[in-house]
Image (cartoon, rainbow, N blue to C red):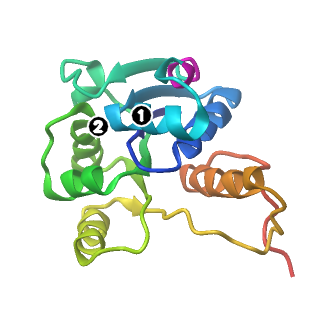
């Protein structure tokens, strides 16, 4: 599969990094966009630089690189994942404000009918955020909030991270063994 991964400036940058690791391990082609906000959050939360994230992808772009191949809907991809998705990026996607490469690529995914997975990272949610999620869903996007599941009996933060990333992989139909599936 050919997948665009966008990492924005919300808490939880590790989710995007872990997704890139798993997709790379599975041999998928990944096209990464890291926002300026994500670079600051990654340094704060993970002590990592944008280069650390870029090294996990097949190809990477700056959020302002509007001449990148992925800015065009003629660049065919299988899916796009925005993880984590800041409320600013969610609003831009929901309202068609394509002022950067992340939103432009998401707009392409929606208009072309490709899978768009948005992982909004905020709590509690404002009415504007809920309405923006509604708009993205109505446009064909998949809203996948990183909500904790307790049935896999997580023991450490890595278990919780792997569960979230596993759910993204489930939506993409990528095989994995990141969490124990529900069994009665």
Q: Which residues are magenta?
A: 52-56
Q: Which residue is mark 1?
A: 40
Left or right? Give the position of 97 relative to 71. Answer: left
Q: Residue at x 73, y 54 (%)?
A: 157
Whether tag 1 and tag 2 are in contact, CB under 8 A, the answer is: no
User: Count the marks: how many?
Assistant: 2
Query: Where in the figure is residue 162, as x and y percent of width and height?
Result: 71, 51
x, y percent for residue 142: 41, 61
Q: Which circle marks residue 102 in the picture?
A: 2
- Pick whichever, 5 or 63, lies toward us: 63
Measuring from the top left, give residue 4's x and y in whole percent. 42, 34
Instruction: Report the residue at 57% width, 46% height from top.
Output: 15
Quadrant position of residue 98:
top left
Mark 2 element type: helix
Location of the C terminus by quadrant is bottom right
For residue 13, side relative to residue 184 (left or right): left
């Amino acid at each position: 599969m050919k997948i665009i991964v966008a990492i924005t400036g919300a808490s939880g940058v590790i989710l995007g990094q872990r997704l890139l690791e798993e997709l790379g391990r599975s041999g998928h082609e990944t096209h990464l966009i890291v926002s300026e906000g994500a670079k600051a959050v990654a340094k704060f939360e993970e002590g990592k630089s944008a280069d650390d994230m870029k090294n996990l992808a097949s190809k990477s772009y700056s959020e302002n690189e509007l001449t990148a191949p992925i800015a065009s809907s003629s660049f065919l991809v299988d899916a796009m994942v925005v993880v984590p998705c800041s409320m600013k990026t969610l609003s831009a996607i929901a309202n068609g404000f394509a002022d950067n490469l992340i939103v432009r690529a998401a707009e392409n995914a929606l208009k072309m009918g490709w899978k768009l997975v948005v992982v909004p990272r905020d709590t509690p949610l404002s009415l504007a955020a809920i309405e923006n999620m509604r708009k993205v869903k109505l446009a064909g996007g998949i809203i996948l909030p990183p909500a904790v599941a307790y049935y896999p009996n997580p023991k450490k933060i890595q278990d919780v991270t792997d569960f979230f990333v596993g759910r993204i992989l489930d939506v993409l139909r990528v095989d994995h063994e990141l969490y124990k599936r529900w069994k009665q």
